[in-house]
Amino acid sequence: MRTRRAKDRSRLIQAAMGEIPCQLTIGNVQYFNVFTGEIYPAEVDILDGYVVRVREAGEQAPVPAEKRYDGGGNYLIPGFIDTHMHVESTMMIPENLSRAILPWGTTTICTDPHEIANVMGIDGVKFMLENAGRSALRQYALAPSCVPAVPGKESTGAAFTAKEIGELLDLEGVVGIAEVMDFVGVCQDSPRMHSIIDEGEKRDMYLQGHAPYVSGKELAAYRLGGPKSDHESVSAAEVREKLRCGIHVNLRASSLIDNLTDLVDGFRDHPWQDFVSICTDDVHAKDLLTTGHINRVVRKAVQAGLDGRAVVKMATLNAAREYHFDDLGAVAPGYVADIQLVEALDGSRPLAVFAAGRLVAENGVYLGGDRLDRPFDFPNTVNVPQLRSADDFRMRVPEGWQGDTIPVRVLVPQDMGRVLRTTKTVELPVRDGAVDLSGHPELLFVAVANRYGTGGKTIAVYESFGLERGALASTVSHDSHNLTVAYRDPDSAFLAAETLARCGGGVCAVNDGQAACLPLPVAGLMSQEPCGKLAEQIGQVQAAIGDISDGTVKLLETAILSLPVLPGTVVTDMGLVDGLSQTFVPVFDI
């Protein structure tokens, strides 16, 4: 697939033959050839956003270019490609994301807008595509395959069937089907997943995978079902098995999950590493501002012992080949002139970045020159009429229960990151018709409330969460993005929920009747603020969370408590869900 279609081949041929001048030459560079692995002095000629020639040292251009950029003897490499990310996780709208990551050397991203799709459906995806066009970063979208992630186990603002997927795949800028998270449905050949994947197959489009812990016959079935990649490996053994199955592995280091060193061990000694590329998945604005984007993952991979040349190839040519982008991922005749100049092949910040031959960043400063429009109005998507008072956050026992205590299924962590949880039954006291945790400092309540106006909520009990007082609430709650509140007392919970309902969503920490809020009024997921200001706001709310916790609770600690595709027990607005069996589990063990 060519990513730029308006290509005047005649002009490019004329420029290569010296009949007309190129517009730009980038000279005095050490050129890294991603096809051969060689590094040698060269000059790169550019016309109409394409590379015309790469001339080796001493070879003069027949006609001098109109402009020349001195590379200062630094390395010239292709722009980085992020093979999988959620723009919404940055909490920035696409145009502001562009201005934040181009200075780090990323020139193309392949996004899964399933966060906003779960909230606003097709209209949300169209907003992301339209807004992405306002700036210089090349942003492609994939049609979200699992909206909702697990039908019948959570409430969302939209539901996609094969019909909606087909409609999205026909939009300009959509290049495939996004991470197929319902691996159980694929392996069991469920009619829903089969029909959704069919929409991509019949258009010969890219099918992105998502298969944590999947192995053996299930992994074979998953690959046969259509998905071609995976970014969810948790161990070296898992990476190795997936590569051996011909599955393209996306090496990930995100703001939420970073086990990259372990993953590298899965292919470190492989003579061929063409099926490894790089992604960020979920990366926060503060991390973007301070440590970078794809270059950050490159840096970590090099620090893990990989050769810098191999890692740069993973982040460029391997990524382009994964998506069948025929004109991205290299600096060679006919390729789009997405280029960066770097001091070393180690993920350090680029000295200069070019997108389609245009200088868009220099020394960490964005130079894109795109128009900054005034902020736009966005509808408030937080509608929680079922939450009218603090009493709605009391965990009521079943009607007619007479005992002074009641057996409750408590969610306890299975891993150090508190991501996967199982349940154990604990006999808890009952006071005034509700569960009382006052004598259990290790426990707290978590409520998930439908925020799409149709009512419904579930209250569960969690162990070892790290919250010591007050409440922490968020509308960033994968993937349904219902209102999720972790709390010690109902008054704090209601204040947090009320605050987010007023501002259109975000993250709120409540301490002693005072609310610290990070407003995310764009679908309850994103801000219209630029990266710097947003990072400052994030820092303020994170500090407030530190005041009510043991210091281990992150800004988005509640973000995956409600994700029913996890292989553990989660709480959704409909009840407790066992992720492996995809069945409901009663809150009370009676």
Image (cartoon, rainbow, N blue to C red):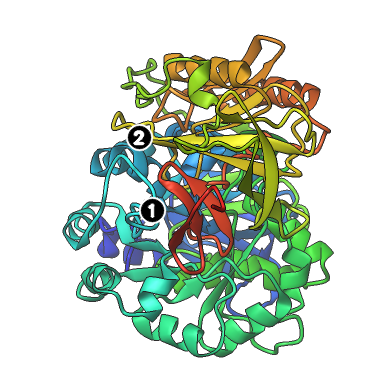
Q: Can you identify the residue that label 1 sits on?
A: 153
> Within 10 angstroms of label 2, few (less than 14), some, or many (20 or more) residues?
some
**How many numbered marks have been drawn onto this rendered protein structure?**
2
Question: In this orientation, does residue 365 appear?
Answer: yes
Residue drawn 26% across and 58% down?
Answer: 5
Q: Is residue 517 visible?
A: no
Q: Nearer the viewer, residue 79 or 509?
A: 509
- Outermost residue on the front side: it is 402
Q: As shown in the figure, which amino acid type bears the numbered disc 1? A: Lys
SS at circle 1: loop
Q: Confirm or deny contact between disc 1 and disc 2 (CB under 8 A).
A: no
Residue on which disc 2 sits: 131
Q: Which callout, 1 or 2, points at the residue further toward the start of the chain?
A: 2
Which percent across, then down, holds residue 415? 74, 59
Crowding around mark 1 (Cα neighbors within 10 Å: few <14, some 14 to 19, many 20+) is many
Element type at marker 2?
helix
Tag nearer the camera, 1 or 2: 1
* In this picture, residue 145 sits left or right of residue 235: left
Q: Residue at x 55, y 28 (%)?
A: 433
Residue 412: image x %, image y %? 70, 52
Query: Could you give the CA–CA distance between mark 1 and mark 2, rounded to whole angstroms?
Result: 32 Å
Q: Residue at x 58, y 80 (%)?
A: 274
Position of residue 281 measured from the top left corner of the image (x, y, whole percent): 56, 53
Query: Of the residues shown, which amino acid type is indicated by label 2?
Result: Asn
Viewer-proximal residue among 577 and 483: 577
In the displayed structure, 395 sits above or below 160; it is above
Identify whether 311 is placed above or below 336.
below
